Amino acid sequence: MSSLNWSELVKDAGDTSSFEPMPEGDYELKVVESKATNTQSGKTMFKITTEVQGGPFNKRKVWDNLTVSPEVPKAMTMFFVKMSALGLGKDFFDTNPSNAQIEAALLHRTFRGKVTQETYQGNVGNKIGMYHRTVASPTVNPAAAAPAPVAAPAPAPAPATPFDGPSIDVPVVAAPPAPPAPPAAPVAAPAPAAPVSSEPF
């Protein structure tokens, strides 16, 4: 008997009805793989694999290459627009991150992508045309991953200052009177002295 949970496996596989391209439209996507590499011409490129989140095409994959082309300002504008949609904005790049840091920061980022169809070598496939930021993609700063500096100990609290307001007479409540002492025990009367005889012995 098989120990595999085939029901869960086929569920996790997502859409398996065909390899036909998805219809064009907006999809919630998540970066499940990212790799910093170089193009054949030596340009820096970040290859990402995204996965559809939910809907009838859940877990279908769409690929994109984010190429750095400093000699083409318009291409660089599009590069940074896409990065910003992924939560990697100006503050992130102002830190001059390494390719490895960018690669790591891209992983698990979510965004809304406008998926289109294109024909390449006679085959129709999907590509991501536009990137739109979602609430689930907060801005990332690589410095945030560094250990936070140890906070200096808080200064000792200043001594309390005397009250300068008007004085207030506080009524003094007298202590309750002590209960009366129990009555003293009666003292026995002294016994009468014996009479002295006046007769001679």
Image (cartoon, helix red, strand yellow):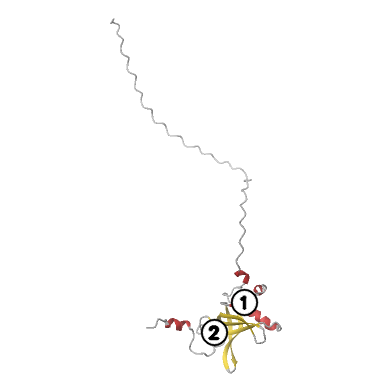
Label 1: few (<14), some (14–19) or many (≥20) C-alpha neighbours in 10 Å: few
Q: Quadrant of residue 111?
A: bottom right
Of 167 and 32, nearer the camera is 32
Three-letter amino acid code at disc 1? Ala
Q: SS for tag 1? A: helix
Q: Which residue is mark 2?
A: 61
Q: Position of residue 51 (x, y in %)?
A: 54, 82
Q: For this view, does 51 lie left or right of residue 73?
A: left
Q: Is residue 171 left or right of residue 191?
A: right
Q: Residue at x 45, y 82 (%)?
A: 9
Which of the two residues, 115 or 120, is positioned nearer the viewer here?
Answer: 120
Q: Position of residue 10 (x, y in %)?
A: 45, 84
When the figure is inspected, residue 9 is found, relative to residue 119, above or below; the finding is: above
Label 2 crowd (10 A; few <14 / some 14-19 / many >=20)? some
Q: Which mark is residue 24?
A: none
Q: Residue furthest top?
A: 200
Which amino acid, mark 2? Lys
Q: Which quadrant would the C terminus be assigned to in this image? A: top left
Question: What residue is at 68 percent from the left and 81 percent from the top?
Answer: 76
Q: How many marks?
A: 2
Mark 1 or mark 2, which has the lower sequence index? 2
Say which of 131 and 164 sits in front.
Answer: 131
Residue 153: which quarter of the image? bottom right
Q: CA distance from mark 1 to mark 2?
A: 23 Å
Q: Where's the N terminus, which quadrant?
A: bottom left
Q: Position of residue 151 (x, y in %)?
A: 61, 60
Q: Nearer the viewer, residue 116 or 167?
A: 116
Question: Secondary structure beneath disc 2?
Answer: strand
Q: Which residue in the protein does label 1 denote?
A: 100
The answer to whether the residues at label 1 and label 2 have Cβ atoms under 8 Å apart is no
List x then y, in percent, for residue 170: 56, 41
